[in-house]
Structures are given as structure tokens and as C-alpha cells.
Amino acid sequence: MYNMLIVDDEPMIVDSLYRLIADLERPDLELLRAYDVIEAMEWLQSTRVDIVLSDIRMPGMSGIQLQKEIRRQWPRCRIIFLTGFSEFDYAKEAIRGGGIVDYLVKTDGDQTIVRAVEKAIGEIESSLLDEHFLLKSKANMRLALPMLQKEYLLDMLQGERQTAKARADKFAELDILLEPEAPLLLLIGRVDGWDGHYTSSDRTLFVFAIQNIVEEYMQSESNVAAISYDSQTMIWLIQPADTADVPERFAMAHWDKLKHYTYQTLEPIQETCRKLLKVSLSFVMANSETEWDMLEPRFNKLKFLLGNRYGLEEEVIVLEHETENDGDAQYQTVRTQRGRLLGQLEGWLEKGQKDKFLLVLDDYMRLELPAKEFHLFEAFYPLALFFMSYVNRNGQFRLLMAPADLNKLMVMNEHSSWQGVIRYFRGLTDLLFASLESGNDERTGKVVQYLDRYIQTHIHLDLSLTTLAELVHHSPTYLSKLYKREKGMLLSDYITTMRMEKARELLISAGHLKIQEIAAAVGYEAAAYFTRYFKKMFSLTPQEFRDKYAEMKAETKER
């Protein structure tokens, strides 16, 4: 949807240009009118303007001054200047100001103006693919690269799966200097405690300094990607350096060397951080390399080892090993996956995507379930709380009015089996989405009904898409789509139909009114413009319609 502003201090010129452009019948073009520069400035301040068609000489502000204001507020706006003066020097000054599509003399004719408008629309559409725009986007992406790298690698640590090719493409795009098909060594570091006087920004700088120290120690033997996990936890993904041409029979030796070097280097890193940064640091390191698709369970196990087993100690160095408690560490992966899936459930619920919600719900319910009953409780109650919270926030509590339903939501033992739990939550999902869909349809229906009533009772007023959108607090583009989805027709077509029906009614019942007066009564400023639309709909001009109706009425009386 493009907004085009027509500006001139002569109302007849504004209205004739409005009719000329409206006759293009482009539903993607919303026309706005300003009869002086003050009104033009009001439009520029309240509405996005994509094209301006303006007189270049007006009282109060020259076209050049208006051009500067347009460029300041809407720098991508295209400007078409009209003038009765062929002043080449003035035109050159306007063109230097930027954004000029055409500089036309008013006597050039309607088709010249139409071509200039079409050209402006074409330039806007092509600018989206302009090479400079793309290069600028890439430059901005470079500035955001560290954050994009972190988010992408964190997604992989939290279970995001990709093919090796997709991973390779993303590594190249984000400049991640790791081999997408080679395994890696996982290392986690933790700041054991912060002094109370450190601010959040101080801690961020210290984490960055620790990452630099680790990479300084490791760079001769490895390629490293560092990730800040939270305010005191860091992760390093490590691979041997320059192994691409190493024969397979020597690859294991390279990994053994890397693991040995990394483990032996952790103590000097601790000491450096203690002396330079006055920070104590603990580490946990995997005892073997990890494939990319297995990062999530390995990461969760190491995090569990460092946080749960050695959480009260400082400056520890833990090398992963098998213990009797490994089952608990491994189950931490399931806990993490469930937390991630709950976040996805909320996203799909907010978007009203029932099919995708059910797929994620099935994944949640079918994650590995150990025999221990408390693990089942761990799975059940976060999901129950999720549903209860959403129901409360959105006023859907009537879905749980029956005591049996409420008990089943809040008491796991009300279900005879885990399959019964699954059936219950799927049934609750059906009820919830049915209620949401009904509510959305009801809200949309009310908006459309309100617009229809407003149009019918204000048929003589400005019924531009921008005006109507402000009434219902939607954007013009969204309102246009919403109305067409609800009624199967364009809002502009409905307005035209209502205006023509009202005009026909007045032509029949108000014989004393002139055609010009009827045109004004149904929202048309010019009788010629009204006549064109009326004939298009009824195949008769308004006067022909009135004459024919009078003739038919006379014939009826004679009979």
C-alpha cells in the first residue's frame, strides 16, 4: 500500500488531479489531498507518505522548502513537481535536493502526469532490490555479527538441528571459523562470584576479557568460537587448527593433542584471570569430541556437572567422566528441551497456529520419560501451569468451569495413565483454539459491521482508507486485508457500491435535487466524476436514469 499526497493551493487543481489518479483504479494507492502547505505538513507529520505530487510555487512555502521537509521526514519518498513556469534553474535546484522523479509543466497533459506517477511507483518497488540498499544491509549485518553468531550457536546448543550443508552456509554467512562437518570439543567456564560493586556493564566487559584470554592461550593449537551464555557462564567450541589436509589415520592424534593441551592450559588461564582481572574462574571440559547434532545433551551434562556438583567450590577444573549420577545429568537435557518447547508453545498459541502448536505439544509429551514418578510430575505441572496462566490472562476461564476439568488440569493423579494426560491436553488445546478463533472472528466481524454502518451513515464524507483505518485503530494496509478476508470484496468497492445505491435512491426520491447536489450528497466533489462511476455501474448517466425512471412512472400511471 502506497500513500500519495497531492498538494496545490488551488482546490480545483487538487481535485482534478485526485480524480485523474483515482481513475487508475489501483487498490494499492491511497490518495491524500492538501489544499495548502500547512495541510501538507500535517499529513507529513501524521502519515507515511510515499509519493508527493505538488505545485512548486505556493504561498507560505516554496516547493524547494517543502521538498526539504519531505526528505527530512520521509527520505524514501518520491516527489513529482508541477508548475506553470518553465524555469530550468529552479528545476535544477529541486533535482539537487533529491527524491525527484519528475518536474512537469502543468500544460504537459494528463497522460504525462499519469506516467510520472507510474514511474514513481516503479522506482519505489525497484528500490527494495537496489544494490546500494543491499550493500548497506550487509554493512549493518557486519556490525551485528557477534550477536548473530552468539544467537545461532546458542540455538544449536539448545537443540536446533541442521544439515551439514545448511550449517556450512550459515557458518559462511556469519563468518564462524569452525568446520561444519568436523566434531568439536566443548568447554564451559564459570565466574565463581562477582564483587558487589560490579555493574552489569562491568561484568560484560570482564566476560569479554576472559574470552580474549582463553582465545589467546588456545589460538596456536585450535580454532575457537566463544559464546556468552549468561552473566557468569561462557562456552567455547574448539576444533584442532589446520586439520583439513591431515590424513584420517593421524586425526585421532590431533584430537588427543588438543584435549591434552586444552586441559593443561586451564590452570594457567585461571591464574591469569586471577592476577589480571581479580576474578576466580572454574571450568568443566568434555572428555571427548562431540558431533554437532549431539551438542545439546553434552552441553547440558557439562553444565549440570559444573553447576550442581561443584557449585559451592571455586577455581575447580572438572574433566567429564562417568559416575553413578550420570543419569541425573543426562536427564537435565530433557528438562532443557521441555523448557524450550514450552517457549515454542506460547509462540504458536499467540500466533493462533494450532497445527504447529499440536506438533510441539506432542514433542513435549513424548520426550523420554524415566520410570521415576517425580519425573512425570516434572513434565506435567509446568504444562498445566502454562495452560492455566494463558487461560487466566486471556479471560478463557470458562473452559475450565467443570470441577472435573479443573481437577484434571491441576492434579496429575486424576489421570489413569500418561496416555490419558496426552489426550486431556490435546482436548484442552482443541477447546482453547476454538474459543480463540471464535473470539477473533467476533472481533473482526464487529470491526467490519462498524465500518459498514459508518459508511452508510457518513456516505457524504471523506471515506479514504486512511480515515477509516484511524477510526478502528488499524493500519490502512491491515484494514484493507482484514475487510477483504471477511467480506470477499475490497473496502473501496463497498464504498462505491453504497454511494451508487444512495445516489440511485436520491435520483428516484429527490427530484428537486440537481445532479451536482446528489453527487455532493454521496461524497463526490465533481459531478463529472460522479457521473463516470454511476454510468459504469448502471450503464446510464444519472440524468438518463432519472429520465428513464420518470418515463416508467408516467407509463405506470397511464395504465
Image (tube, rainbow, N blue to C red):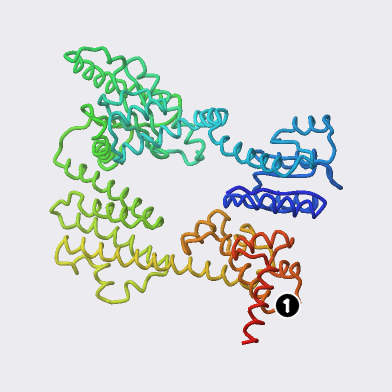
- Does 386 sit above or below residue 85? below
- Does 460 sit above or below residue 36? below
Seen from the viewer's position, the closer of residues 279 and 98 is 98
Numbered disc total = 1
Q: Residue, x 75% and y 67% (percent of image)?
A: 516
Q: Element type at marker 1?
A: loop
Q: Amino acid at mark 1?
A: Gly
- Does 509 sit above or below residue 22? below
Quadrant housing the C terminus: bottom right
Residue, disc 1 = 511
Seen from the viewer's position, the closer of residues 235 and 24 is 24
Q: Quadrant of residue 497?
A: bottom right
Q: Residue, x 33% and y 60% (percent of image)?
A: 386
Position in image of residue 491 (x %, y %): 56, 61
Position in image of residue 130 (x %, y %): 56, 31
Left-right relation of 142 to 34? left
Seen from the viewer's position, the closer of residues 168 and 558 is 558
Left-right relation of 488 to 152? right
Position in image of residue 507 (x %, y %): 68, 74
Q: Quadrant of residue 224?
A: top left
Left-right relation of 407 to 231? left
Q: Residues within 10 Å of mark 1 (few under 14, many from 20)?
A: few
Seen from the viewer's position, the closer of residues 451 and 342 is 451
Position in image of residue 104 (x %, y %): 76, 38
Residue lying furthest front in this view? Answer: 559
